[in-house]
Image (cartoon, grey):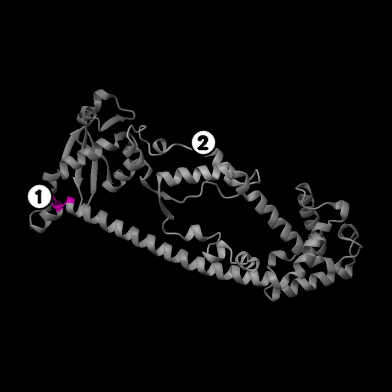
Amino acid sequence: MKELFRRCCRGPTLEEYFAVDEYTEATLLHHPHIYITVQEIVDTHALLIEYQDILAPDPTDRLNELLDDLGEVPTVSQLASRDVPSQMGEAEENAKLEVCLALVNKFQAPTDDMTDLNKLFIKSKELCVAIIPFLNGEHLLEALCIGTTRAQQEQYREKVQKRIYSGQARPDEAMSLREHIAKLRRNLQMLEDEGYVTREDGYQALITSIALDLCNKGKYRQAQRRALATLSRTKLSLMEKTKYYEEKCKSYDQYIKSCLANLHAGKRSVHACLRSGKDIKKIKSKLTIKYSAAKLLERGVLLEIDGLATSQFKNVQFEITPTNHNGVFTVKGKFMGVEMESIEIDIQDLLQKQYEGCSIMDMFGKAKINVNLLIFLLNSKFYG
Protein backbone atom coordinates (compact mmCIF):
# COMPACT_ATOMS: atom_id res chain seq x y z
CA MET A 1 0.00 0.00 0.00
CA LYS A 2 2.86 2.38 0.82
CA GLU A 3 4.43 1.66 -2.55
CA LEU A 4 1.12 2.49 -4.23
CA PHE A 5 0.96 5.87 -2.53
CA ARG A 6 4.61 6.55 -3.42
CA ARG A 7 3.84 5.90 -7.08
CA CYS A 8 0.83 8.19 -6.88
CA CYS A 9 3.03 10.95 -5.46
CA ARG A 10 5.51 10.52 -8.32
CA GLY A 11 2.88 11.32 -10.93
CA PRO A 12 3.21 14.22 -13.36
CA THR A 13 2.43 17.73 -12.20
CA LEU A 14 -0.83 19.38 -13.17
CA GLU A 15 1.04 21.65 -15.59
CA GLU A 16 2.62 18.65 -17.33
CA TYR A 17 -0.56 16.56 -17.37
CA PHE A 18 -2.75 19.30 -18.81
CA ALA A 19 0.06 20.86 -20.93
CA VAL A 20 -0.46 24.24 -19.28
CA ASP A 21 2.25 26.91 -19.02
CA GLU A 22 2.53 30.66 -18.44
CA TYR A 23 1.63 31.36 -22.07
CA THR A 24 -1.50 29.20 -22.24
CA GLU A 25 -3.92 31.96 -21.26
CA ALA A 26 -2.66 34.26 -24.01
CA THR A 27 -3.29 31.60 -26.68
CA LEU A 28 -6.86 30.75 -25.65
CA LEU A 29 -9.56 31.70 -28.13
CA HIS A 30 -12.20 31.45 -25.41
CA HIS A 31 -11.88 31.55 -21.64
CA PRO A 32 -12.60 28.20 -19.92
CA HIS A 33 -16.19 27.87 -18.68
CA ILE A 34 -17.73 25.60 -16.07
CA TYR A 35 -21.37 24.81 -15.38
CA ILE A 36 -22.13 24.53 -11.69
CA THR A 37 -25.24 24.67 -9.53
CA VAL A 38 -25.81 27.31 -6.87
CA GLN A 39 -25.75 24.64 -4.16
CA GLU A 40 -22.35 23.40 -5.36
CA ILE A 41 -20.97 26.94 -5.23
CA VAL A 42 -22.17 27.38 -1.65
CA ASP A 43 -20.78 23.97 -0.60
CA THR A 44 -17.40 24.66 -2.24
CA HIS A 45 -17.17 28.05 -0.55
CA ALA A 46 -18.01 26.51 2.83
CA LEU A 47 -15.35 23.79 2.43
CA LEU A 48 -12.70 26.34 1.46
CA ILE A 49 -13.49 28.42 4.54
CA GLU A 50 -13.45 25.33 6.78
CA TYR A 51 -10.07 24.08 5.57
CA GLN A 52 -8.48 27.44 4.74
CA ASP A 53 -5.66 27.00 7.28
CA ILE A 54 -4.67 23.70 5.66
CA LEU A 55 -5.10 24.76 2.04
CA ALA A 56 -3.37 28.13 2.42
CA PRO A 57 -1.14 28.21 5.52
CA ASP A 58 0.96 31.02 4.03
CA PRO A 59 -0.64 34.42 4.87
CA THR A 60 0.47 35.76 1.47
CA ASP A 61 -1.29 32.96 -0.42
CA ARG A 62 -3.61 34.32 -3.12
CA LEU A 63 -6.38 32.00 -1.90
CA ASN A 64 -6.54 33.92 1.38
CA GLU A 65 -7.05 37.17 -0.50
CA LEU A 66 -9.80 35.65 -2.62
CA LEU A 67 -11.64 34.26 0.40
CA ASP A 68 -11.33 37.59 2.22
CA ASP A 69 -12.89 39.35 -0.77
CA LEU A 70 -15.75 36.84 -0.88
CA GLY A 71 -16.59 37.24 2.81
CA GLU A 72 -18.95 34.90 4.61
CA VAL A 73 -20.61 31.93 2.95
CA PRO A 74 -23.90 33.13 1.39
CA THR A 75 -27.18 31.27 1.45
CA VAL A 76 -28.59 29.64 -1.66
CA SER A 77 -31.34 32.25 -1.96
CA GLN A 78 -28.82 35.11 -1.63
CA LEU A 79 -26.56 33.65 -4.30
CA ALA A 80 -29.51 33.00 -6.59
CA SER A 81 -30.54 36.69 -6.20
CA ARG A 82 -34.03 35.67 -5.16
CA ASP A 83 -36.18 36.36 -2.15
CA VAL A 84 -36.16 33.84 0.69
CA PRO A 85 -38.60 31.15 -0.48
CA SER A 86 -41.62 30.28 1.55
CA GLN A 87 -41.99 26.79 0.14
CA MET A 88 -39.57 23.88 0.11
CA GLY A 89 -40.06 23.36 -3.62
CA GLU A 90 -38.77 26.86 -4.37
CA ALA A 91 -35.71 26.29 -2.16
CA GLU A 92 -34.84 23.12 -4.06
CA GLU A 93 -35.33 24.95 -7.34
CA ASN A 94 -32.88 27.66 -6.26
CA ALA A 95 -30.30 25.06 -5.16
CA LYS A 96 -30.47 23.26 -8.51
CA LEU A 97 -30.21 26.48 -10.50
CA GLU A 98 -27.26 26.05 -12.89
CA VAL A 99 -24.95 28.93 -13.77
CA CYS A 100 -22.08 29.29 -16.23
CA LEU A 101 -18.83 30.75 -14.88
CA ALA A 102 -15.92 31.97 -17.02
CA LEU A 103 -12.36 31.63 -15.72
CA VAL A 104 -10.63 35.02 -15.59
CA ASN A 105 -7.45 36.14 -13.86
CA LYS A 106 -8.30 38.37 -10.91
CA PHE A 107 -4.70 39.32 -10.23
CA GLN A 108 -2.60 41.58 -12.37
CA ALA A 109 0.71 40.42 -13.79
CA PRO A 110 3.63 40.88 -11.37
CA THR A 111 5.38 44.21 -11.50
CA ASP A 112 8.47 44.56 -13.62
CA ASP A 113 10.62 45.72 -10.68
CA MET A 114 11.64 42.22 -9.59
CA THR A 115 11.98 41.07 -13.19
CA ASP A 116 14.33 43.97 -13.94
CA LEU A 117 16.45 43.13 -10.88
CA ASN A 118 16.66 39.49 -11.92
CA LYS A 119 17.75 40.57 -15.39
CA LEU A 120 20.36 42.85 -13.84
CA PHE A 121 21.64 39.97 -11.69
CA ILE A 122 21.96 37.71 -14.75
CA LYS A 123 23.69 40.44 -16.76
CA SER A 124 26.12 40.99 -13.89
CA LYS A 125 26.95 37.28 -13.83
CA GLU A 126 27.61 37.28 -17.57
CA LEU A 127 29.80 40.37 -17.24
CA CYS A 128 31.70 38.84 -14.33
CA VAL A 129 32.37 35.61 -16.26
CA ALA A 130 33.61 37.64 -19.23
CA ILE A 131 36.15 39.78 -17.36
CA ILE A 132 37.23 37.66 -14.37
CA PRO A 133 39.94 35.73 -16.33
CA PHE A 134 41.67 39.07 -16.89
CA LEU A 135 41.59 40.22 -13.24
CA ASN A 136 43.80 39.57 -10.21
CA GLY A 137 42.79 39.13 -6.58
CA GLU A 138 41.63 36.62 -3.98
CA HIS A 139 37.94 37.49 -4.34
CA LEU A 140 35.72 39.56 -6.63
CA LEU A 141 35.79 42.74 -4.54
CA GLU A 142 39.58 42.73 -4.43
CA ALA A 143 39.78 41.94 -8.16
CA LEU A 144 37.60 44.92 -9.00
CA CYS A 145 39.71 47.24 -6.86
CA ILE A 146 43.10 46.17 -8.22
CA GLY A 147 44.09 47.93 -11.41
CA THR A 148 44.65 46.09 -14.69
CA THR A 149 47.82 45.93 -16.73
CA ARG A 150 48.19 47.00 -20.34
CA ALA A 151 48.66 43.35 -21.36
CA GLN A 152 45.39 42.32 -19.68
CA GLN A 153 43.53 45.13 -21.41
CA GLU A 154 44.97 44.15 -24.80
CA GLN A 155 44.09 40.47 -24.28
CA TYR A 156 40.54 41.41 -23.35
CA ARG A 157 40.20 43.69 -26.39
CA GLU A 158 41.31 40.87 -28.71
CA LYS A 159 38.82 38.49 -27.12
CA VAL A 160 35.93 40.94 -27.58
CA GLN A 161 36.87 41.57 -31.22
CA LYS A 162 36.89 37.82 -31.93
CA ARG A 163 33.44 37.47 -30.35
CA ILE A 164 32.10 40.33 -32.47
CA TYR A 165 33.55 38.91 -35.69
CA SER A 166 32.11 35.45 -34.93
CA GLY A 167 28.68 36.91 -34.18
CA GLN A 168 28.75 35.96 -30.48
CA ALA A 169 28.72 39.60 -29.35
CA ARG A 170 27.18 42.85 -30.56
CA PRO A 171 29.29 45.83 -31.66
CA ASP A 172 27.84 47.90 -28.81
CA GLU A 173 29.52 45.48 -26.38
CA ALA A 174 32.97 46.53 -27.62
CA MET A 175 33.94 48.35 -24.44
CA SER A 176 37.37 48.31 -22.88
CA LEU A 177 38.21 46.20 -19.83
CA ARG A 178 38.15 49.27 -17.59
CA GLU A 179 34.72 50.28 -18.90
CA HIS A 180 33.36 46.80 -18.24
CA ILE A 181 34.80 46.82 -14.72
CA ALA A 182 33.13 50.17 -14.05
CA LYS A 183 29.84 48.83 -15.41
CA LEU A 184 30.06 45.73 -13.19
CA ARG A 185 30.72 47.94 -10.17
CA ARG A 186 27.59 49.98 -10.91
CA ASN A 187 25.52 46.83 -11.32
CA LEU A 188 26.82 45.38 -8.05
CA GLN A 189 26.04 48.63 -6.26
CA MET A 190 22.43 48.53 -7.47
CA LEU A 191 22.12 44.85 -6.52
CA GLU A 192 23.58 45.58 -3.09
CA ASP A 193 21.05 48.37 -2.57
CA GLU A 194 18.28 45.82 -3.20
CA GLY A 195 19.84 43.18 -0.94
CA TYR A 196 20.90 40.75 -3.67
CA VAL A 197 24.62 40.85 -2.82
CA THR A 198 26.91 42.43 -0.23
CA ARG A 199 30.52 43.58 -0.42
CA GLU A 200 31.13 42.32 3.12
CA ASP A 201 31.56 38.77 1.79
CA GLY A 202 33.15 39.84 -1.50
CA TYR A 203 29.90 39.47 -3.46
CA GLN A 204 29.94 35.75 -2.71
CA ALA A 205 26.26 35.36 -3.68
CA LEU A 206 27.13 36.27 -7.27
CA ILE A 207 30.09 33.86 -7.38
CA THR A 208 28.02 31.06 -5.82
CA SER A 209 25.29 31.58 -8.40
CA ILE A 210 27.85 31.36 -11.22
CA ALA A 211 29.22 28.12 -9.75
CA LEU A 212 25.71 26.64 -9.54
CA ASP A 213 25.10 27.60 -13.15
CA LEU A 214 28.22 25.71 -14.19
CA CYS A 215 27.21 22.65 -12.16
CA ASN A 216 23.68 22.66 -13.57
CA LYS A 217 24.69 23.46 -17.13
CA GLY A 218 23.21 20.23 -18.46
CA LYS A 219 19.94 20.74 -16.61
CA TYR A 220 19.70 24.30 -17.87
CA ARG A 221 20.14 23.14 -21.45
CA GLN A 222 17.36 20.61 -21.01
CA ALA A 223 15.16 23.30 -19.51
CA GLN A 224 15.99 25.60 -22.42
CA ARG A 225 15.03 22.90 -24.91
CA ARG A 226 11.72 22.38 -23.12
CA ALA A 227 11.15 26.14 -23.00
CA LEU A 228 11.95 26.39 -26.72
CA ALA A 229 9.43 23.64 -27.48
CA THR A 230 6.85 25.43 -25.33
CA LEU A 231 7.48 28.74 -27.09
CA SER A 232 7.20 27.04 -30.49
CA ARG A 233 3.82 25.59 -29.52
CA THR A 234 2.77 28.96 -28.16
CA LYS A 235 3.78 30.69 -31.38
CA LEU A 236 1.69 28.27 -33.44
CA SER A 237 -1.27 28.75 -31.11
CA LEU A 238 -0.95 32.54 -31.33
CA MET A 239 -0.79 32.35 -35.12
CA GLU A 240 -3.98 30.28 -35.12
CA LYS A 241 -5.59 32.75 -32.74
CA THR A 242 -4.55 35.67 -34.95
CA LYS A 243 -5.97 33.94 -38.01
CA TYR A 244 -9.21 33.25 -36.15
CA TYR A 245 -9.66 36.92 -35.20
CA GLU A 246 -8.69 38.13 -38.67
CA GLU A 247 -11.38 35.90 -40.16
CA LYS A 248 -13.90 37.23 -37.64
CA CYS A 249 -12.98 40.81 -38.54
CA LYS A 250 -13.46 40.04 -42.24
CA SER A 251 -16.79 38.41 -41.48
CA TYR A 252 -17.98 41.41 -39.45
CA ASP A 253 -16.76 43.82 -42.12
CA GLN A 254 -18.62 41.90 -44.80
CA TYR A 255 -21.73 41.86 -42.63
CA ILE A 256 -21.60 45.64 -42.13
CA LYS A 257 -21.14 46.21 -45.87
CA SER A 258 -24.08 43.93 -46.56
CA CYS A 259 -26.25 45.84 -44.08
CA LEU A 260 -25.30 49.17 -45.65
CA ALA A 261 -26.03 47.79 -49.11
CA ASN A 262 -29.46 46.64 -47.94
CA LEU A 263 -30.15 50.07 -46.46
CA HIS A 264 -29.36 51.62 -49.84
CA ALA A 265 -31.60 49.19 -51.71
CA GLY A 266 -34.70 51.40 -51.24
CA LYS A 267 -36.37 53.66 -53.75
CA ARG A 268 -34.21 56.62 -52.82
CA SER A 269 -30.93 54.75 -53.34
CA VAL A 270 -28.38 56.47 -55.54
CA HIS A 271 -27.19 53.08 -56.80
CA ALA A 272 -30.72 52.06 -57.78
CA CYS A 273 -31.16 55.32 -59.63
CA LEU A 274 -27.84 54.86 -61.44
CA ARG A 275 -28.97 51.45 -62.68
CA SER A 276 -32.15 53.06 -64.00
CA GLY A 277 -30.08 55.13 -66.45
CA LYS A 278 -31.46 58.50 -65.35
CA ASP A 279 -29.50 61.74 -65.08
CA ILE A 280 -27.36 61.38 -61.95
CA LYS A 281 -27.15 65.14 -61.39
CA LYS A 282 -30.92 65.50 -61.32
CA ILE A 283 -31.24 62.48 -59.04
CA LYS A 284 -28.64 63.80 -56.59
CA SER A 285 -30.38 67.16 -56.62
CA LYS A 286 -33.65 65.47 -55.65
CA LEU A 287 -31.95 63.39 -52.95
CA THR A 288 -30.16 66.37 -51.39
CA ILE A 289 -31.72 67.62 -48.18
CA LYS A 290 -31.28 71.24 -47.16
CA TYR A 291 -31.64 72.72 -43.70
CA SER A 292 -30.87 76.12 -42.30
CA ALA A 293 -28.72 76.26 -39.20
CA ALA A 294 -31.73 77.69 -37.35
CA LYS A 295 -33.81 74.63 -38.30
CA LEU A 296 -31.08 72.21 -37.23
CA LEU A 297 -30.74 74.15 -33.98
CA GLU A 298 -34.46 73.78 -33.41
CA ARG A 299 -34.23 70.02 -34.02
CA GLY A 300 -31.27 69.73 -31.67
CA VAL A 301 -28.88 68.46 -34.37
CA LEU A 302 -26.83 71.68 -34.32
CA LEU A 303 -25.70 72.94 -30.93
CA GLU A 304 -23.64 76.01 -31.79
CA ILE A 305 -21.35 77.61 -34.36
CA ASP A 306 -18.21 79.24 -33.02
CA GLY A 307 -18.02 82.96 -33.75
CA LEU A 308 -21.56 83.22 -35.10
CA ALA A 309 -24.55 84.62 -33.21
CA THR A 310 -27.77 82.62 -33.11
CA SER A 311 -29.56 85.43 -34.94
CA GLN A 312 -27.33 84.77 -37.97
CA PHE A 313 -28.18 81.03 -38.15
CA LYS A 314 -30.95 81.73 -40.68
CA ASN A 315 -28.24 82.77 -43.18
CA VAL A 316 -26.34 79.47 -42.82
CA GLN A 317 -27.48 76.45 -44.79
CA PHE A 318 -26.41 72.81 -44.62
CA GLU A 319 -26.81 70.53 -47.64
CA ILE A 320 -26.52 66.76 -47.20
CA THR A 321 -26.14 64.60 -50.31
CA PRO A 322 -25.52 60.83 -50.51
CA THR A 323 -22.44 59.79 -52.49
CA ASN A 324 -21.89 56.76 -54.69
CA HIS A 325 -20.45 54.89 -51.68
CA ASN A 326 -22.77 53.17 -49.24
CA GLY A 327 -23.18 55.11 -46.01
CA VAL A 328 -21.08 58.11 -47.11
CA PHE A 329 -22.58 61.59 -47.40
CA THR A 330 -21.30 64.97 -48.56
CA VAL A 331 -22.14 67.89 -46.27
CA LYS A 332 -21.81 71.42 -47.63
CA GLY A 333 -21.93 74.56 -45.53
CA LYS A 334 -23.20 77.75 -47.17
CA PHE A 335 -23.42 81.30 -45.85
CA MET A 336 -25.71 83.75 -47.65
CA GLY A 337 -25.86 81.26 -50.55
CA VAL A 338 -22.08 81.06 -50.95
CA GLU A 339 -20.49 77.65 -50.37
CA MET A 340 -17.92 77.93 -47.60
CA GLU A 341 -16.79 74.36 -46.86
CA SER A 342 -17.54 70.77 -47.82
CA ILE A 343 -16.76 67.50 -46.04
CA GLU A 344 -17.67 63.83 -46.27
CA ILE A 345 -19.09 61.92 -43.32
CA ASP A 346 -19.35 58.14 -43.02
CA ILE A 347 -22.26 56.69 -41.08
CA GLN A 348 -19.90 53.99 -39.79
CA ASP A 349 -17.76 56.68 -38.16
CA LEU A 350 -20.87 58.19 -36.60
CA LEU A 351 -21.97 54.81 -35.25
CA GLN A 352 -18.46 54.26 -33.85
CA LYS A 353 -18.63 57.60 -32.04
CA GLN A 354 -22.05 56.67 -30.69
CA TYR A 355 -20.70 53.32 -29.47
CA GLU A 356 -17.76 55.03 -27.76
CA GLY A 357 -20.12 57.43 -25.97
CA CYS A 358 -19.03 60.51 -27.95
CA SER A 359 -22.25 62.54 -28.19
CA ILE A 360 -20.83 65.72 -29.78
CA MET A 361 -18.61 66.13 -32.85
CA ASP A 362 -17.05 69.06 -34.70
CA MET A 363 -18.02 69.84 -38.28
CA PHE A 364 -16.01 72.29 -40.38
CA GLY A 365 -13.99 72.98 -37.21
CA LYS A 366 -16.68 75.40 -35.98
CA ALA A 367 -20.08 73.71 -35.77
CA LYS A 368 -20.92 71.48 -32.79
CA ILE A 369 -23.17 68.59 -33.89
CA ASN A 370 -25.21 66.14 -31.80
CA VAL A 371 -24.06 62.73 -33.08
CA ASN A 372 -27.16 60.78 -32.02
CA LEU A 373 -29.61 63.22 -33.61
CA LEU A 374 -27.52 63.45 -36.80
CA ILE A 375 -27.70 59.65 -37.13
CA PHE A 376 -31.45 59.83 -36.56
CA LEU A 377 -31.77 62.52 -39.25
CA LEU A 378 -29.81 60.47 -41.81
CA ASN A 379 -31.79 57.32 -41.04
CA SER A 380 -35.15 59.07 -41.31
CA LYS A 381 -34.32 60.92 -44.54
CA PHE A 382 -32.33 58.34 -46.48
CA TYR A 383 -33.17 54.95 -45.00
CA GLY A 384 -36.73 55.50 -43.74
Q: Position of residue 109 (x, y in %)?
A: 57, 50
The earlier-in-sequence mark between 1 and 2 is: 2
Q: Is residue 252 visible?
A: yes
Instruction: Report the amino acid beneath label 1.
Output: Lys
352 lies above or below 243: above
What residue does disc 1 label? 267
Q: In this rendering, is residue 24 above or below 282?
A: below
Quarter holding the C terminus is top left
Horizontal side of 176 relative to 71 (left or right) equals right
Region of the chain picked out in magenta, as a range: 263-270
Q: Amino acid at mark 2?
A: Glu
Residue under the image location 72 percent in, 65 percent down: 173
Return the x and y of residue 309 as percentages of the image width and height. Answer: 29, 24
Where is residue 358? Give x, y as percent. 35, 38
- Helix, strand or loop at label 1? It is loop
Relative to 360, is 48 above or below?
Answer: below
In the displayed structure, does residue 9 sit left or right of residue 278? right
